Image (cartoon, rainbow, N blue to C red):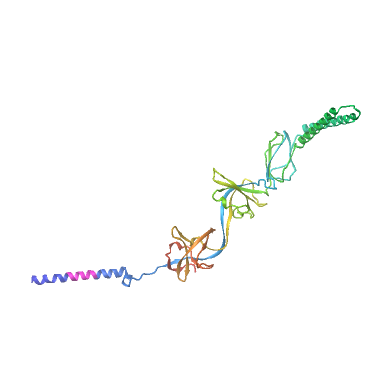
Amino acid sequence: EGRPMGRRRPWVVVAVLAAAIAAVFVARRLYHPGEAESGAEVETEVAVHTGRIAKATLHRYVTAYGRVEAEPPTPGEPPAGMILGSQVAGLLVGIDCAEGGRVARGDTLFRLDPRVAEVDVAGAQKALDFAEQTLQRQQKLLPVDGTSQKALLEAEQQRDAARNDLSAAQTRLALTKITAPLSGTVTRIQAKLGQSVDSGTELAEIVDLDRLAVSAGVPSAEAPLLRKGQPVELGPGSPSGARVSYVGEEVDPATDTVQMRAALPAKSGYRPGRFLELQVVVDEHKDRLVVPEESLVSRAGEGAWIYLVDGDRAVRRPVTPGLREQGLVEVEGEGLSEGTVIVTKEAYSLPPETKIRILDR
């Protein structure tokens, strides 16, 4: 009986192996059903949001920061702001202006005590009268040999000197009234009534608020893009009409910037000293094809592309990006046209071509 049992053992081993192979096959069918069919892959469907290619006008800007100031002198135009000072010493007895007040050119704004200057004018006038009388006598005596040619010349010189003294005294008297050198607004007054002032003492500042400019420093690398006359934007709600009026030639080595100015339009509402951000429009592309920035995919070494919607599929399309502004980017490429539907938010996660389901239809 022991011998027949020994002969059945190989068949038992074969049966166990067959059962194991069958179990493995069933398991592979359960966990990898696609492998049972000729290697076919299941295509993934991606839910996406969409937009459209549009047309817009985009701009390139150079950004700078600066302060509002009175416009400096230009050919044919005096400076728009001046410091008003006294040219003679004296006692300040009158202030005929107020901070924030509008004045016209030639208006009297400050008055110094004129009494000393008036005495000087009166004395100079008397000296001139005497010199003229002396000269007249010499002129009458010369034809009858009652005087010499030398005495006549000396009388003429004394008359001329007296005239000069009177003119100087009258000028000093006139300078006791300090007048406005330009029409504008008195932005500050530094003097007080009863103050004793010296020649050169600053009394007030006058600015023509209709002739203001913003002075700013621009990085030297961007300065070549600037041109006189370029439009300047000063932020939302700012008045239009600001333009580049000056671009410097020298680079400030301490800041690596070039000085520029933008002239503000009249009645701009700005005041000297205000700090502003300037956006200088250095380039403009009109009526270009644009897409939302979120729809543009760009990777170093691979280029840039967008995804066009073709039925239920998203197809990658290479593009060349251009200017960017307010969430839009200019694009160029084959097969692009206004109104074409494109993938937006999910563009970065898509393969070159895939089946899609549009969420915002």
* x then y, percent, for residue 5: 11, 71
> Which residues are drawn in magenta?
13-21
Left or right of 237? Residue 48 is left
Image height of 159 relative to 324, above or below: above
* x then y, percent, for residue 332: 51, 63
View extreme (right): residue: 144
Residue 34 painted magenta? no
Q: Main SS of the magenta segment?
A: helix
Regarding residue 327, the answer to whether it shows in the image is: no
Left or right of 113? Residue 64 is left
Regarding residue 298, the answer to whether it shows in the image is: yes
Q: How many marks?
A: 0
- Determine which quarter of the picture holds residue 312: bottom left
Q: Residue at x 49, y 63 (%)?
A: 319
- Determine which quarter of the picture holds residue 91: top right
Image height of 147 relative to 252, above or below: above
* x then y, percent, for residue 3: 8, 71
Residue 19 painted magenta? yes
Left or right of 236? Residue 100 is right
The residue nearer to you, when weighing 71 against 311, is 71
* x then y, percent, for residue 162: 81, 31
Image height of 316 relative to 76, above or below: below
The quarter of the rendered structure image containing the N terminus is bottom left
The residue nearer to you, when weighing 249 against 64, is 249
